[in-house]
Structures are given as C-alpha cells and as structure tokens.
Amino acid sequence: MGKTIRTEAVEELFKAILTLKDEEECFKFFEDVCTVNEVLSIAQRFAVAKMLKENHTYLEVAQATGASTATISRVSRSLNYGNDAYDMVLSRMEE
C-alpha cells in the first residue's frame, strides 16, 4: 500500500492551520512553514483546478498558470477521481 497523509504529524499540522484566523495569519504561517516555491506550487494547482472546473482547455490553463501538462493532468485526475475537495472548497468560496 502507498503512503498516506493520515499521520499524527499531518493531523497536528491541520489542527494548527485550523487555528489561523485570517489571511494575514495564513501568509505568516505558510511563509514560516513552507518555502516560497512550495506555496506557489500549491497555489498553482488550485488555480489549475479552478480553471478546469470553468471548462478551460489544457492549453488555456497552461498559458494562464504556467503549469505543466503533467501538473494539469494530475489536478484533473483529482477533480475526476479524488475526494471532491476542490469542488467543496470552490463552491464554498462562491457563497
């Protein structure tokens, strides 16, 4: 069986994230916890997911986000076969 993110350390990380009160606290926390490239990579994947949900083509997504086709395919797989978390968050953001 493959790796799982369900570890005690990840659970503690998620609990810490859930204590953040606003966007400024998020910036501070993630700047300390992650490298700039790690945060930018996660943000890029989220932008890719948003564009794919809006029915943009892979070419449009690649041009707008700078994401590779491999990254776009990976995000597309998550959208189609994942845990529906992108859909959940994107719909909440529309509210």
Image (spheres, helix red, strand yellow):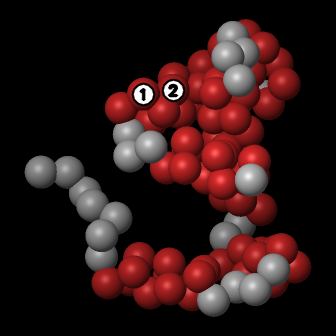
| Cβ atoms under marks 2 and 1 closer than 8 Å | yes
Point out the frontmost of discs 2 and 1: 1
The kind of residue on which mark 1 rests is Asn
Q: Is residue 11 above or below residue 82?
A: below
Q: Is residue 10 above or below residue 54?
A: below
Q: Residue at x 41, y 76 (%)?
A: 10
Q: CA distance from mark 2 to mark 1?
A: 6 Å
Left or right of residue 8, residue 49 in this image:
right
Give the farthest residue toward the left: 1
Label 2 sits on residue: 76
The kind of residue on which mark 2 rests is Ser
Q: Residue at x 82, y 18 (%)?
A: 63
Q: Residues within 10 Å of mark 2 (few under 14, many from 20)?
A: some
Q: Secondary structure at mark 1?
A: helix
Residue 80: numbered disc: 1
Q: x, y percentage for residue 2?
A: 20, 51
Q: Is residue 54 above or below residue 17?
A: above
Q: Is residue 86 above or below residue 19?
A: above
Whether residue 42 is visible, yes or no, is no
Q: Residue at x 64, y 41 (%)?
A: 45
Q: Residue at x 44, y 87 (%)?
A: 12
User: Which sits in the foreground, 6 or 85?
Assistant: 85
- Picture quadrant of residue 70: top right
Q: Residues within 10 Å of mark 1 (few under 14, many from 20)?
A: few
- Picture quadrant of residue 55: top right
Q: How many marks?
A: 2
Residue 38: numbered disc: none
Q: x, y percentage for residue 33?
A: 66, 78
Q: x, y percentage for residue 29?
A: 73, 82
Give the farthest residue toward the front: 95
User: Which sits in the foreground, 92 or 53?
Assistant: 92
Left or right of residue 60, residue 91 in this image:
left
